[in-house]
Image: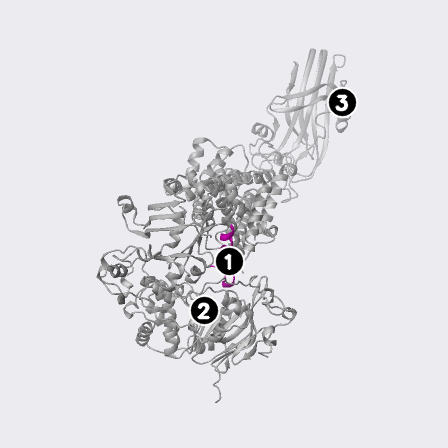
């Protein structure tokens, strides 16, 4: 009932490269210096009303992706569509209109609120930027509604407090109120609970779920915590070194991961149940820096199943089952009959 | 058969921090034991006092921390009464050592990794430099770091490798107890798994006793034999890990375990614990959890619940549990 | 520490505000209050203070004649006239208005000699300067001669003749003796004592009774002679004056000190405000907008930083001409660089803060972010820098004035030090030391306040 098949967000072949600081002279002379390839060609879409989880370890590019979709960082290449309108090339004033529809909730509940502003000022700011609310009392009304929505009650108590007077969970609610006061349709949530205490996280996550239903929101939920991704999302995409290496329904990806990296991830996540013994992690080493991306499949140096093709070519996403794809040559090879089923890794 | 006396016994430890605003009652009447070869998890949210307990064991508390009462018995000797000199020579790093929080940042960036470990050995043991160097390489190999990389500088190590190097440093003098304070917090998922595996393997192979401090219950569940859940400076529940996670008794334990979304199993709506952790300058009277407890009764706001053994080696501090006919 | 600073600042602020009421003199223009380089009164009680011998020099009423002892020989009429009065000399001195001493002689009477005497007791150590002022007007109708002389009779009855108009026969409109009757006049000293280096110590060498005598002689053949005297004052110049003595021009040093605080505070704060405003604007724009504008501004910053401040200021004031406003603006223009760098680096760190990003995500434009998020967060640093820049400005101005490049119409503390040095009065410590102490203390006040502000606004520096 909540998810239509209409795509609200469509990302096509998105790239973001950050140039690395070189010397003064070489920055003048060369254009294609070394760069950090934070996002190296990803495409996906988010349906209206769904929560799409973007997971991966640090350095995989998920945070950059969230910001690039909102054009807080300008993409190097690629297109972003919001409701079938291409927003990649919009000029500043046009973009400002779309900013009302697309908002962000940031990770650090303290840093995302200006410590010198009162809660009222913080939540009213988006209204003032877009000229909503004709007079003070109307604005105050909207702010109080927003605070009530995030369960900061009674709202009058919070209006004139400062961020440092609030707990981490309360501050994050203020951030949510600020993001939602413009009634956006799409919200990027970048690790919204990872800096909160464990017992507070659940509250905030449940709040986000309730608000999604109530306000008809669509989320891009970015997290490194797979358990939270499973709790929140319908579909997820797993990123590694700037590419999406697996996507699909969250249950399928988690319980039946296809890509070797995803499999290793699932095995590595500890579970709060001492009775379950986890198998060993099949991969070695650590994720390289995004400045030294291996040739061919980026995962090949660590992959226990890598074969010759993996070191040469870059695999594209291959649909293993309907709606569930992985960027791994094993599946392509199996599908075309060149290898047997026994070679396919599984948990 | 008479049970061996525990290797470490913390008895009725009370410790406050003196601040400009008053006393922060960080550790209030904490008591537990650690057996030889046991891995004990100290779990709880930030500010519950778990790190303070660990610091007290090595007597590396900040200057404004005051231990009011209690004992910490290491093989029967109360180390709180030992002088600073004795602690430095006999206890710290030799019998108890620690891998502190954000340990990877504890490596001095201008010295090679091997030098730093060698220095720790020389400081505590009477060995020659060559012997210390040899031992360093052995230690690094044990934690899974290739000895050829021993002479690298810290910035050439990845986060997981630095963490493992710190574990090696903690093992330098063959301690009996190793305290790991949030050993995996800043690490990525896969690296976290690798480090935890190293810790677990070492603990088994060397017969170490370990105290693992973490706010992440799943880490504790995967590595520890026993678990203690602390709340607001007091112990809520102390039991074997299997029992604790299978059937938590204290309302806070239930709430906390229930607050962790699980990777395995059906997705169901998690229940949150309402309210927030108390301000330790002025904690609630009686049971410190009572303002957030869904089962609280009048007695909970008046009397501090004692830590009682409900059944074999399973301790809970909750009036409702203690008075339940099944457990009293 | 901040309280000490505030206390000091309050002290100088009170000094600045109450200066005009505490000190009735103009620091620049009220000269000749006492002997030049007079010492402070508290230094030596035996030193002579300003003594005005005549109480009512302007002859304001008929009773004015009562302080004089008048000896008459011959038959002239001595009276008080309200018809005539010394009008003064335009732009030089004011007259006391109507009311004067009148002497009338006519032919029936013949010769007459009038002695107007004023006796007084002198009981200080010998003064260095003594002057007499007198205005006279003579109306001769007919054939007559007249002569006016001014004497001082000493304790041992020796008479010193200070002035002799010499016998004249015509009318004279209001005039004063030329040269003026003043022991500072070398010809008078030579005439009286045959010694150019003598001074009023020879006039009043001992304590005792002295008399000022004005002799008026007339010889009327026919007709009438009317002689009017007005603005008759005699002054023993004080060697001690006020709280801090006088400078070379006889201006009250205490007044100069009091008024100096106003100027120093004004110059200090205005220059600092200009510097901080400039620094704020450049820092904000440079930091947030970045790009080529940032490069341009920072390179200009660097270039200006390499210019040595004081020599550059010296050259500029020499070219533009010294005036208080040029000094203020120049100090401001040369003081913004460090502040701009500080603000810029703070803006750079604020720029990447999460709340700025959140604001941009809400659709905020550049100016909105600068206004709402950056400025409030850099103001604390701006205030601190303001407090810390003022002392530099004060000292720079003092340095410029000391070198003689300050506004010549303003008596600032630096100018006072310049005077000390210029006139070689270094031994007169009551003149040389206070301005320096004031400069140092006022600067110290701002520095203490600045450090205290830094402590308040930068909680990481605070002790637990």
For label 3, the SS is strand
Identify the residue position indicated by label 3 in the image: C72
Instruction: Tell me the residue at 47%/76% (across/down).
Output: B87
* Marks 2 and 1, how far apart at CA: 20 Å
In the displayed structure, would residue C328 be above or below residue A61?
A: above
Q: Which residue is mark 2?
A: A272
- In the image, which residues are magenta? A195-214
The quarter of the image holding the C terminus of chain C is bottom right
Residue C428 position within the rendered picture, expressed as x and y whole percent measured from the top left: 56, 43
Report helix, strand or loop for mark 2: loop
- Mark 1 lies on residue: A206
Residue B214 or residue B93, whichever sits in front: B214
Label 1: which secondary element: helix
Left or right of C156 on screen, residue C191: left
Relative depth, front residue between B319 and B12: B319
Measuring from the top left, give residue B67's x and y in whole percent: 55, 72
Mark 3 vs mark 2: tell me if same chain. Answer: no
Give the distance between the C-alpha atoms of the residues marked 1 and 3, in whole angstroms. 119 Å
């Amino acid at each position: 009932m909540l998810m239509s098949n209409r795509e609200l967000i469509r990302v096509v072949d998105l790239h973001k490269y950050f140039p690395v600081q070189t010397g003064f002279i070489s920055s003048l002379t060369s254009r294609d210096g070394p760069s950090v390839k934070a996002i190296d060609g990803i495409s996906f879409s988010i349906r209206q009303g769904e929560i799409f989880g973007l997971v991966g370890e640090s350095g995989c590019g998920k945070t950059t992706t969230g910001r690039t979709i909102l054009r807080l960082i300008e993409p190097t290449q690629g297109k972003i569509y919001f409701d079938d309108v291409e927003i990649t090339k919009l000029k500043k004033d046009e973009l400002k209109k779309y900013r009302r529809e697309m908002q962000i909730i940031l990770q650090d509940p303290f840093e995302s609120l200006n410590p010198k502003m009162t809660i009222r000022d913080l939540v009213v700011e988006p209204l003032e930027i877009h000229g909503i609310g004709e007079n003070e009392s109307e604005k105050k009304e909207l702010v109080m509604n927003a605070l009530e929505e995030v369960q900061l009650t009674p709202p009058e108590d919070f209006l004139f407090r400062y961020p440092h007077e609030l707990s981490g969970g309360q501050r994050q609610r203020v951030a949510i109120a600020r993001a939602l006061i413009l009634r956006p349709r799409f919200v990027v949530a970048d690790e919204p609970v990872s800096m909160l205490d464990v017992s507070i996280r659940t509250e905030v996550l449940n709040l986000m779920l309730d608000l999604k239903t109530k306000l008809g929101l669509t989320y891009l939920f970015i997290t490194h915590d797979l358990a939270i991704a499973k709790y929140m999302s319908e579909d997820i995409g797993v990123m590694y070194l700037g590419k999406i290496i697996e996507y699909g329904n969250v249950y399928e990806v988690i319980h039946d991961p296809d890509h070797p990296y995803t499999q290793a991830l699932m095995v590595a996540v500890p579970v709060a149940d001492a009775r379950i013994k986890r198998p060993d992690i099949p991969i070695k080493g650590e994720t390289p820096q995004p400045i030294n991306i291996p040739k061919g499949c980026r995962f090949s140096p660590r992959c226990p199943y890598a074969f010759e093709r993996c070191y040469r070519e870059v695999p594209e996403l291959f649909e293993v089952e309907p709606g569930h794809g992985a960027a791994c040559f094993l599946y392509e090879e199996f599908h075309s009959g060149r290898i047997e089923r026994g070679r396919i890794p599984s948990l | 058969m008479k049970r061996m006396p525990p290797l470490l016994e913390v008895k009725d430890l009370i410790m406050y921090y003196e601040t400009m605003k008053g006393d922060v009652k960080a550790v209030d009447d904490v008591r537990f034991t650690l057996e030889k070869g046991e891995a004990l998890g100290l779990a709880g949210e930030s500010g519950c006092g778990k790190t303070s307990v660990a610091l007290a064991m090595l007597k590396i508390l900040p200057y404004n921390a005051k231990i009011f009462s209690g004992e910490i018995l290491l093989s029967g000797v109360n180390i709180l009464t030992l002088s600073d000199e004795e602690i430095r020579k006999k206890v710290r790093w030799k019998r108890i050592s620690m891998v502190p929080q954000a340990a990877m940042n504890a490596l001095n960036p201008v010295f090679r990794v091997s030098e730093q470990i060698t220095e720790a050995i020389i400081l505590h043991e009477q060995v020659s430099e060559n012997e210390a160097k040899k031992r360093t390489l052995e230690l690094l190999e044990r934690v899974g770091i290739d000895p050829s990389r021993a002479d690298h500088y810290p910035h050439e190590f990845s986060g997981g490798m630095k963490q493992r190097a710190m574990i090696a440093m903690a093992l330098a003098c063959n301690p009996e107890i190793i305290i790991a304070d949030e050993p995996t917090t800043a690490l990525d998922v896969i690296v976290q798994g690798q480090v935890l595996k190293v810790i677990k393997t070492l603990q088994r192979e060397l017969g170490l006793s370990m105290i693992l401090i973490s706010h992440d219950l799943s880490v504790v569940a995967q590595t520890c034999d026993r678990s203690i859940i602390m709340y607001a400076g007091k112990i809520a529940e102390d039991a074997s890990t299997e029992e604790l996670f299978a059937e938590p008794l204290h309302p806070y334990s239930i709430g906390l375990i229930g607050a962790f979304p699980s990777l395995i199993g059906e997705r169901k709506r998690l229940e949150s614990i309402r309210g927030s952790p108390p301000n330790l300058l002025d904690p609630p009277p009686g049971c410190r959890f009572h303002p957030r407890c869904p089962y609280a009764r009048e007695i909970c706001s008046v009397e501090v619940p004692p830590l009682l053994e409900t059944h074999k080696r399973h301790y809970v501090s909750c009036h409702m549990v203690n008075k339940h006919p099944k457990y009293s | 520490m901040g309280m000490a600073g505030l206390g000091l600042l309050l002290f100088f602020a009170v000094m600045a505000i109450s200066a005009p009421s505490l000190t009735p003199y103009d620091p620049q223009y009220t000269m000749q209050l006492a002997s030049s380089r007079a010492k402070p009164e508290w230094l030596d009680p035996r030193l002579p203070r300003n003594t005005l011998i005549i109480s009512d020099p302007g002859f304001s009423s008929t009773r004015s004649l009562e302080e004089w002892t008048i000896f008459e020989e011959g038959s002239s009429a001595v009276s008080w006239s309200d018809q005539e009065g010394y009008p003064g000399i335009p732009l030089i001195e004011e007259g006391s208005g109507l009311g004067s001493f009148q002497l009338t002689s006519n032919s029936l009477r013949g010769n007459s000699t009038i002695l107007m005497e004023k006796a007084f007791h002198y009981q200080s150590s010998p003064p260095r300067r003594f002057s007499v002022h007198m205005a006279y007007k003579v109306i001769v109708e007919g054939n007559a001669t007249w002569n006016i002389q001014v004497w001082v009779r000493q304790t041992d009855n020796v008479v010193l003749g200070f002035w002799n108009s010499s016998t004249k026969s015509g009318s004279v409109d209001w005039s004063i003796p030329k040269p003026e009757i003043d022991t500072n006049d070398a010809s008078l000293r030579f005439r009286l004592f045959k010694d150019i280096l003598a001074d009023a110590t020879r006039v009043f060498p001992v304590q005792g009774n002295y008399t000022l005598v004005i002799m008026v002689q007339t010889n009327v053949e026919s007709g009438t002679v009317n002689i009017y005297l007005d603005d008759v004052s005699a002054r023993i110049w004080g060697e001690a004056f006020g709280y801090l003595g006088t400078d070379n021009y006889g201006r009250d040093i205490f007044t100069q000190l009091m008024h100096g605080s106003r100027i120093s505070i004004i110059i200090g704060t205005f220059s600092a405000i200009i510097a901080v405003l400039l620094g704020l604007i450049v820092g904000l724009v440079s930091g947030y907008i970045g790009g080529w504008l940032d490069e341009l501004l920072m390179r200009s910053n660097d270039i200006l930083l390499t210019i040595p401040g004081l020599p550059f200021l010296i050259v500029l004031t020499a070219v533009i001409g010294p005036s208080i406003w040029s000094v203020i603006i120049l100090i401001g223009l040369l003081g913004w660089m460090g502040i701009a760098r500080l603000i810029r680096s703070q803006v750079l760190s604020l720029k990447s803060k999460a709340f700025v990003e959140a604001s941009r995500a809400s659709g905020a434009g550049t100016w909105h972010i600068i206004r709402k998020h950056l400025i409030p967060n850099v103001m604390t640093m701006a205030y601190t820098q303001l407090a810390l820049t003022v002392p530099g400005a004060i000292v720079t101005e003092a340095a410029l004035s000391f070198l003689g490049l300050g506004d010549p119409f303003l008596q600032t503390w630096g100018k006072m030090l310049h005077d000390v040095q210029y006139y070689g009065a270094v031994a007169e410590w009551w003149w040389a030391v206070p301005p320096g102490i004031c400069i140092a203390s006022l600067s110290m006040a701002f520095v203490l306040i600045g450090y205290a502000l830094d402590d308040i606004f930068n909680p990481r520096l605070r002790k637990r």
